[in-house]
Amino acid sequence: MADQKVTPYNDVDTKREQVENMFDNIAPYYDLLNRVLSLGIDKRWRSKAITLLKDIPSPKILDVATGTCDVALEMAKKLNDPTIVGLDISAKMLEVGQKKIDKAGFGDIISLQQGESENLPFDDNTFDAITVAFGVRNFDNLHQGLQEMKRVLKPEGQLVVLEFSKPTMFPFKQGFNFYFKNVLPRIGKLTSKDPKAYQYLYESVQAFPDGDNFIEVLDTLGYKKSSCTALTVGICSIYHTRK
């Protein structure tokens, strides 16, 4: 299933450039909005995803689309002697993340780097695991991004993707659509001054090939043992696979 091209703004820039600009714009408000808009559930989702990697001894981990480093920080706290590289296209998001890392005292565990998911600046077979939380739907080219992550994973290395999905059960489907389409952009407009960013969130979730469709993409690209676990009546899903 081909990924549909949905962009934050209707301008001539590439999706990558638009996504970078969008996250630069909302970086100061991103953490607060996440907590408010998800009612704090996003923290539990991240924690559940990270537990999939708890048995890897001293893992070297790449956190793609690290944003303000919530996942990287959680892994630094909970995993067994990890070394973590956080990568993101938005310099402003990384600035916020670096301040959180410094405050938590994890500068010796987490390093940050600006870069693109479709052109990872790492050698083949570098990482034991890769995590992506709420980032794959923002890739300019989904297949290329997934192939790049597979390239830099070690043999049998693990990929954990946490991403919004579309609930199918009544009345959660209807409530989800109303909230994401009508309520969330208004909150985003009042809080971040960039209503387009939260309109894009709804549109990008709708366009993303979730559930079995994403598993099919992973299988097509040669990933192995791919699985999908739905969370909170299907609002979010964890995808776990291996190189």
Image: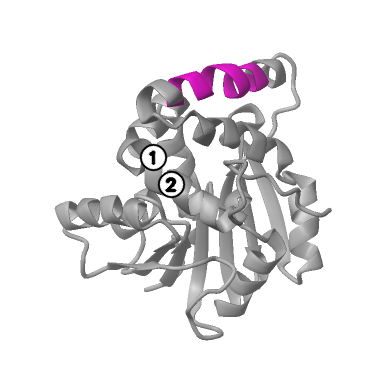
Where residue 27 sits in the image (x, y, percent)? 35, 43
229 on left or right of 219: left
**Viewer-proximal residue among 199 and 221:** 199
Taking 124 as reference, is 53 above or below it?
Answer: above
Where residue 78 sits in the image (x, y, percent)? 33, 55
**Viewer-proximal residue among 16 and 217:** 16
Q: Residue at x 70, y 44 (%)?
A: 208
Q: Please say if the residues under marks 2 and 1 sit with CB atoms less than 8 Å apart.
A: yes
Where residue 186 sits in the image (x, y, percent)? 49, 19
Taking 224 as reference, is 207 above or below it?
Answer: above
User: Splitting the image into 4 quarters, where does residue 243 fall?
Assistant: bottom right
| Residue closest to the far front | 12
- Which three-letter amino acid code belongs to the residue tagged 2? Phe
- Which three-letter amino acid code belongs to the residue tagged 1? Ile
Residues shaded magenta = 176-188
Where residue 65 sits in the image (x, y, percent)? 47, 57
In space, the residues marked 2 and 1 are separated at their CA atoms by 5 Å
Q: Is residue 128 magenta?
A: no
Q: Which residue is mark 1?
A: 26
Residue 165 in view in this figure: no
Q: Residue at x 49, y 28 (%)?
A: 195
Q: Residue at x 65, y 66 (%)?
A: 146
Q: Which residue is mark 2?
A: 23
Q: Which mark is residue 39?
A: none
Q: Residue at x 76, y 72 (%)?
A: 222
31 on left or right of 240: left
